[in-house]
Every structure is written in C-alpha cells, then in structure tokens.
Amino acid sequence: MRIVIDFLYLLAAIAVAPVALYRFIRHNRYRAGWAQRLGRITRKNPSKKCIWLHAVSVGEVNAARTVVDELERKFADYEIVISTTTDTGFARATTIFGDRFGVFYFPFDFSWIMSRAFRNIRPALCLLMELEVWPNFVRIAKKADIPVVVVNGRISDRSFKSYKRVRPLIKTMFSKVTLVLAQTDEYARRFTRLGCNNVIVSGSLKYDTAQTQDKIEDADTLAEQLAITDERLWVLGGTGNDEEALLLDVYQQLKQDERFADLRLVVVPRKPERFDEVAQLILNRGCDLIRYSRIKAGRADPPTDKHAVILGDTMGDLRKFYSLATIIFAGRSLVPMGGSDMIEAAALGKCTVFGPNAFNFKQSVGALLTGNGAIMANDKDDLLAAMKKCLTDPNYAKKIAQNGRKVIIKNKGATQKTTEQIELLLNKV
C-alpha cells in the first residue's frame, strides 16, 4: 500500500506541477521551506519530549492558539513544534508562536520524506487541526505507537462526499487515528462513518480564540493612518474570486443614496496574490483607491478623500479593520466558495452579514442565526436590502451585534475539553 500511495502522489505532483510553477513565478508562492518540506527539520530542544501540532493555514493556526497556550502551561517539560502548509499560515504561525516554538513547513507525505521527518522530530504526540490526516503520516505514527489526535475536527459537506467515494481506502487511513475531538455531533458522526474508532464532541476552538473586547491593539493607529473618524465603515473580510465585483455593486448603489454619503468601504481579500487584481477592479469601477500597505510602509500620507475605497492589502490587520467597522461582511459566501469565519466579527460585537454559501462554517452559521446574532443575505439584492436596514435602523444593527457576541461567549469552552483529553493521552505516554 505504501508503494501505491507514493506512486499516486507522484502522479498528482506531475499533474499539479504546471499550476505550481505558474504560482511560483507569478505570485512568489512555494519559494520557502523546501528543506523542511523534504523532512529536514531541526528542533530547538531535541532533548525534550515533543508535541507536534500541524495547522494548514491561517484559520487553523489562529484556532490553535488557546490549546497551544494551555499545553505550554501544563506541559513545560515538552517542546511544542508547529507545522503549516501555506505561506500565509507559516507567516501567521511565526508571528504568534515563532518566539517560543519551532515553526516549519509540513513535509510532503511521501513515505521516505515523512519517515525522515519523524526521525528528526521524534514526537510523543501529534495534533492535527481540523482535518489534516495523511496516509503515510498516520501509518508511520501508528507503527511507532505515537498517538495522533484530530483537534477541532470537522468534515465539510464537500469533503465528506469526496471521502465516501473512496471509503474503503479512507477507512484504513482514519482507523489509525487515535482520537478525534470533533466540533459538532454531525462532524463526529461523519468521522465515525469514515472509520475513526474514538470520537468525542469537544466544541469549536474558534469560539475560545475569538476576542470579545471592544478594542483591538493598534486599531487606533490604523484608524489614524487612514483618517478614519466617526464615519460608518463597511468591512468586507476574506473576500474571494468574483465576489468583490458583486459587493462593489452593492456599495455603489448605497452611495447613490444621500443617507449613506458617509459610508466608507474596506475590502480585504483572503489571498494576498489577489491584492493587485482587486485593486485594479476597484479602479475600473471608477472608485478612488487607498492601498493600506503603502500607508503602513510609510510610502504614502494619510488620505484626505473620505470616499475612496480602502484596500486592506496587508497580512495580520483584518481584526483591526473589524474592530473599527460598523458592519462586517464575511466574504467567500456570496459566491460558492464555502465562506469565511464570521466568529471573529461577531465576537467583537459587530453587526455581521454573510451570504448563503458559508457551508464550511455550518455550526457557526446555525448558532448565530438561531441566536439572531448575524444576518444571512441570499443574494446581491438581499444584501443591499440588509445593508439599508442596518444603516437606517442603528438599534436593529446594534441588537444583532449584541446577540452575536452573546452567542460566541455562550459557545466557549472547547479549549478545556480539548486539553483534558490531550492530557489523558500524554499521561499514558
């Protein structure tokens, strides 16, 4: 089976090579961490026992924060190492954890590469955020009697359908997972159906990591840099392909109404490689443009035009924009891309709106809508109507925002449940 898996990986690598090469040249992606991706990883404290946590990208890294902090507090005799897959995930992990822990790129799951990684890391326990289960990874861990735990586990509708098509193969892989800590009962049932033998519902860690205070550090600095004062701010967070055009349509229709003359727009695309594309789209729509990256780097003065669209083309500043917002739209949801996390927006006590395609966040969507803590707009026209309602009826928007924060606070507690289960495993180790 190992040879078959490696052969399939080789075929997949050949198939995606042209796309990867294009992104390498055009978007400067996949340029870093090749030694680590090939399993050449060095630990800071090799004499200590080790916990290896893997988080694919920014969302998973952020969700891991409270668990990592608790593990560091409870298990000071262990070294924690953190791997990511994407460049943005690596940058975020380095920012949050880099001063305390080793951060590296996740090795390719070829058998010889993963074997080398395990020899170098020598983990006592492996934690996989959400759904990063790989065949050779779990096979090697199982053979070495190293527990593997899926933390904050979830399986989206799309992933579940895909897995079911190759269920016999997937069942073999998932049966090697020691424990799954699932976000919801539905996700727990899916993991069980796919072959996991030990599944516990622990809740979503993203509620615990969400900040519920009114102010975010350095948000005032950002407001000063962009000359944001008392005007109303609509922040589009984590937007995706083809979505910005629809949202700009709504914004421009709103601006035709003198009641919304003070409304300012901030667009924060999810992927950095799309910053230039979205900037050009904004200009093509006849809007003046402010690129925050230039102001932040000192290459431009604070703007005097209160009507220009602000492009949030930096990393790590979305929460600051959210804290200044009057209304937040959680992107990648007006188009069928699965949505962006709306927990962070609601936790800050902001009126949060999203589209009908947030299927990657079903639990959050259900909890917020049930608690009247967010608004779902079914299409562009529905979004326009929702925005008009929120902007003309501040008490309505305020109530939505207050309810949203209450929902977030009510759903906290996953960190404690998660660390308790990890502690039981580490005590056995």
Image: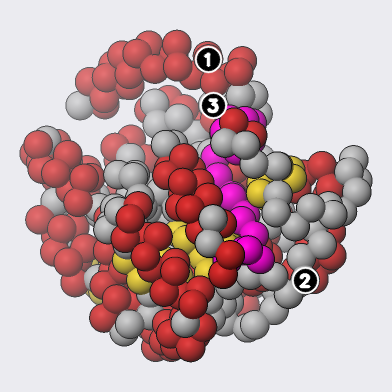
Q: Are discs 1 and 3 less than 8 Å apart at CB?
A: no
Label 2, label 1: how far apart the Cα atoms are: 42 Å
Q: For residue 38, which numbered disc appears in the image?
A: 3
Verify whether residue 267 appears in magenta: yes
Decide if residue 146 is on the left or right side of residue 291.
left
In the rendered structure, which amino acid carries the disc numbered 2? Answer: Thr
Q: Secondary structure at mark 3?
A: loop
Residue 133 versus residue 187 in the image, above or below: above
What range of the chain is rendered magenta? 260-282
Decide if residue 404 is on the left or right side of residue 306.
left
Q: Residue at x 53, y 15 (%)?
A: 22
In the rendered structure, which amino acid carries the disc numbered 1? Answer: Tyr
Verify whether residue 39 appears in magenta: no
Label 1, label 3: how far apart the Cα atoms are: 21 Å
Image position, residue 310 (x, y; %): 68, 50
**Pair 2/3: label in front:** 2
Q: Residues within 10 Å of mark 1 (few under 14, many from 20)?
A: few
Decide if residue 281 is on the left or right side of residue 182.
right
Label 2, label 3: how far apart the Cα atoms are: 50 Å
* Residue on which disc 2 sits: 229
Q: For residue 22, which numbered disc appears in the image?
A: 1
Q: Residues within 10 Å of mark 3 (few under 14, many from 20)?
A: some
Q: Is residue 168 visible?
A: yes
In front here: 417 or 162?
162
In front here: 409 or 9?
409
Q: Secondary structure at mark 2?
A: loop
Q: Residues within 10 Å of mark 2 (few under 14, many from 20)?
A: few
Q: Earlier in the sequence, mark 2 or mark 3?
A: 3
